[in-house]
Image (cartoon, rainbow, N blue to C red):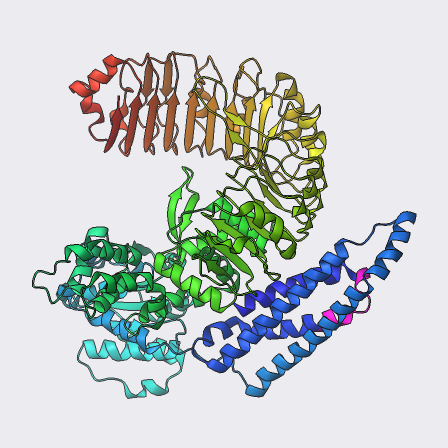
Amino acid sequence: MAEVAVSSVISQLYLLLNQEANFLKGIQGEIEFINDELESMQSFLKDADARGESDDSVKTWVKQVRKVAHDIEDVIDEFMILSASRPQHGMVGLIRRFAFSIKNLIPRHVIANELQNLRTRVIEINGRRERYRFDSSRQVLNPSSSQDLQMASLYAEEAELVGIEKPRDDLLSLLMEEESRRTVISVVGMGGCGKTTLTKKVYDNYKVISCFECRAWVTVSQSPMIDELLRMMIKQFHESMNKPNCLQVETMERNQLIDLLRKYLKEKRYVVVLDDVWSIDFWVSMKYSLPDDNQGSRVIITTRNRTVASSCLDPCNHVYTLQPLATKEAWELFCRRTFQSNPIGCCPPELEQLSLKIVNKCGGLPLAIAAMGGLLSTKDKIVAEWTKLNHSLGYELENNPLLTGIPEVLSLSLHDLPYNLKACFLYFGLFPEDYSIGCRRLFRLWAAEGFVSGEKGKTPSQVAEDYLSELIHRSMIQISSMYSDGRVKSCRVHDLMHDIIISKSKDWNFSEIVAEQNSNPSKSARRLSFHNNKSKGLKTLNFSHLRSFLLFGVHKDLHSFTKASIWNLKLLKVLDLEDSCLDKLPYELGNLLHLRYLNVRNTNIKRLPNSIGKLQNLEILNVKDTYVHELPIGILKLRKLQQLLGYTLKSFNGTSLSPLQGLKASDGIGSLENLQKLAFIEANHGTKIVQGLRGLRQLRRLGITKLRSEDSGDLCNSLEEMEYLKSLSLKAMDDKQFIDLQTVLSPPCCLQRLYLDGPLKKLPDWIISHQNLVRIRLAWSRLRDDPLQVLQTLPSLVDLALHEAYDGDHLHLKASQFKKLKILRLLRLGGLKHVIIGDGAAPSLERLTIVYCRLLEEIPLGIQNLKILTTLEILGVSTELDMKLKAGTDYWKVKHIPNIRCW
């Protein structure tokens, strides 16, 4: 993590040198020198963190680099506070600048001295590296405990394994299929899920041995030596055919080795296992040595990285994802290992609840379950003993020889990450264990921390989405839920990986957790997260180095904390108080001049202090689900603001217009030209709110409430300027105000999500030609013409909801239309009597919901043709239709649907 700290500081120094040149007189040379020295360290730091795990001298040096980088960052941020307070231009400014220079003479002198001291420290640290001759090319040796686990994976007896039957048979069928071309089969899964064990059982299966002429198993690891692996492969091929080895192989160059392999394998049917592949480049280096002679040869690759798996492009390529054990299988394996001395392997009743907690902690990883079971088998079967171990699992993982192999295996994935992803991954440690994290929230935090930034035409949120996908592909993050259009909605990290993150984060001074009343975080902590803590430590929080502060489950002492502690958190960049009992933000909030992110979602605050206008670096403000209904005038000063999010859901009886209440803002809201997300703003509060939105040309998401019919012209003009807009949500003030988008001549070409709540005279003509629309919701539209006739040709539409949107009696999904539609919801369509599904219509439909369509006379005609429909909900329909389903006369039409709800 030293490289993360150094890279962050270099970025800040670059900005400082470019933006504050006139204010750097006397210290610019020091800053430039420090910047150059840090840049010279970077190439070594790329792998120094990983090598520091096994080399104490490197570990000490890395710790010193990290400490000096943090100290440099502190001095820069202190200097920026001083810079931000300097007067502006003009005659009055001239007088104030003179007074300012006198007043700040001493602080500038102190900063200059600190920079000189830091320069000296940087020189000494760089010199120490050269003195001790740290070699950046030196390999990291695999710890013996992880090697032992690898041996155990290779030579585990099949009788000891649980849940292997189905994946074994699946993999065997892929190996034995009749395809004559060389086929690459990639087995993908998280470290410790049993990829090596499964593949070895298949590799040693008698069917495989008899079917292939020669075989080879090569363990690759993170730092493969290609030539040595080629030699190993040649030897194994010779041994599998009982032929003598080629003695000259030890002295051959790579090209000679590849030629020898190709010649030897010509016209042979072979199987090769490349176990534990980490890099895409490895397969590129190896594939030319494995000829494709249409003999039905097979290559099996095991990897933690789905990107590596899918990159092994061959005419035939399969990716097999190995899932963790199901709860029943995990329990069976645990009992086998833990209670092996018991003839029937049963868990004593008094230990069952504790055992279940430990099994759940293992998250279905056979490696962890077997290791935990092995440890507990040596313990007395006493509740107090097991309770103590359960509470100290984090410590046991780090220090107990029977368990240390688990974090070593899992940590390999962490050390393999590039530095930009490493910081993003460690951030998961700030959230509680087993916490499902909303991706939008996560992306905002990453952006505020500076882990992601806009690049190549992408916003920080888009870059963050790419980073999350990479972490998911590396089997390090688990998906909790997804949106209908395929985007990840929430995610989590495996519990055991969470423990490792917390340990590494504290060791690397990245972040610390306060989860108990007696927790004592370091005063040098850069990020702090309070979990279910009721201590009075919040009142006296004094961490002058803190950059991020997050609360989870804290419901006391918040008012005193915010007022007393803000003075001590002047370098804070992230303040996340979501879901807390906070009821007021103090005026002193304006002193947090570095603050980029403020989240008070789902709290009890009623207003924002006008001092918020002093937060010139604020980029993200989230006041959703609070009592804040009006923005202070100071908001208009926040020129760096990128996301302004706020709304409240009022009580909803299902018959009125949208229950969503937006924010009242001044007419000048359109001057915040950097806004990318604005949701929701009330249109009727100011006289020129909608007209002023025309200046927000960077918007990606826009939500407006209380629209009036007379706003339509200004709204259409504003939308034509928003070329990057992806999500548009419009809500009319009442059922007499029409939403008219007909005059939009150049609709936003990137628009993907459209939500219209209010009366429509007709659907805008431009919708039919919009290729990117993925989700559409029409509510209270009262359309007279069947909207499906307009929407059915949209090529990307996945999710469609009609809520009191249509007054007609027929809806017709025509043949071969709605090709990508997965979700269709028909809600409160009071006149609807018939739904007709043409032959081949909606072939991808997975979920159909029909709610309170009282006049519907029959099950949708043609529903039996929706072959992949998994969920049908028919709620609040007529008694006659309900009886047709329950009596069975229409049941034959829906019997192929797994999940049916009807009342």
Across and down, in percent, residue 365 comes to 28, 59
- Residue sitting at 30 percent across and 22 percent down? 875
In the depicted view, which residue is nearer to us: 716 or 793? 716
Looking at the image, the residue that sits furthest to the left is 343
In the depicted view, which residue is nearer to us: 758 or 746? 758
Q: Is residue 32 magenta?
A: yes
Looking at the image, the residue that sits furthest to the right is 91
Overall secondary structure of the magenta section: helix
Q: Is residue 738 magenta?
A: no
- Residue sitting at 33 percent across and 64 percent down? 392
The segment highlighted magenta reads: 22-33
In the depicted view, which residue is nearer to us: 770 or 545? 545
- Residue sitting at 87 percent across and 56 percent down? 99
Looking at the image, is 395 positioned above or below residue 463?
below
Looking at the image, is 531 positioned above or below residue 149?
above
In the depicted view, which residue is nearer to us: 722 or 580? 580
Across and down, in percent, residue 767 comes to 52, 26
Across and down, in percent, residue 375 comes to 24, 69
Q: Is residue 441 visible?
A: yes
Q: Quadrant of the C terminus?
A: top left
Q: Is residue 286 left or right of residue 12?
A: left
Looking at the image, is 899 positioned above or below residue 888?
below
Across and down, in percent, residue 155 comes to 20, 72
Q: Is residue 747 visible?
A: no
